[in-house]
Image (spheres, rainbow, N blue to C red):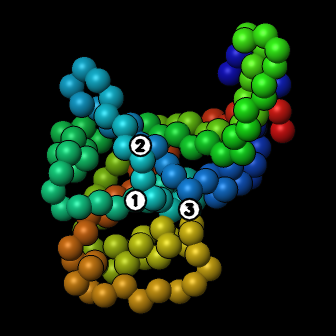
Amino acid sequence: MRRKEKEIADKKDIEAVIRACLVCRLAIIDGDYPYIVPLNFGYKDDVLYFHGAMKGKKLSLLQKNKHAAFEFDTRLELIEAEEACDWSMKFQSVVGFGKVSMIESPQEKKKVLDFIMAQYSDRHFEIPEKSIKGIAVYKLEIEQMTGKQSGW
């Protein structure tokens, strides 16, 4: 990282940024261009979890290429100034990459859906078997991630 003073180096602090976020942006390879999709997610032990439909562009692209990148951002605050080039932004962010795989086992899918719901609620939910069977569930095993912040 070029600006070391902005780096979030401690893994616990990086994970705190992830847990503070509502959306994960996933970048998937689509030929010559990235395809970016915002997702609900769960995080645990260097693995991101997400879900989606059993058909569609995200699934199709991930079947062709398992490599993906991700981005989180939170605590966004615009800092205005008199001069245009003096405007700035307070933020915390995490970026990284890894490989995505599908989870097939209904028991594992249920566990992952519980991780995802835990990102958003302290409540426990019963997930119907029909829902578990009708949804694609993925995990992204993180190979590398870095955190950055400004103004905090």
Q: Position of residue 107 (x, y in %)?
A: 34, 80
Disc 1 marks which amino acid?
Phe
Look at mark 1 in the image and give the residue it sits on: 50
Q: First in sequence: mark 2 or mark 3?
A: 2
Disc 3 marks which amino acid?
Lys
Give the Cα separation between the discs numbered 2 and 3: 17 Å
| Callouts 1 and 3 close, C-beta under 8 Å | no
Q: Is residue 93 visible?
A: yes
Look at mark 2 in the image and give the residue it sits on: 26
Image-quadrant location for residue 149: top right
Q: First in sequence: mark 1 or mark 3?
A: 3
Q: First in sequence: mark 1 or mark 2?
A: 2
Q: Position of residue 49 (x, y in %)?
A: 44, 59
**Local crowd at mark 3 within 10 Å, few (<14), some, or many (≥20)?**
few
Q: Is residue 145 visible?
A: no
Q: Residue at x 37, y 37 (%)?
A: 36
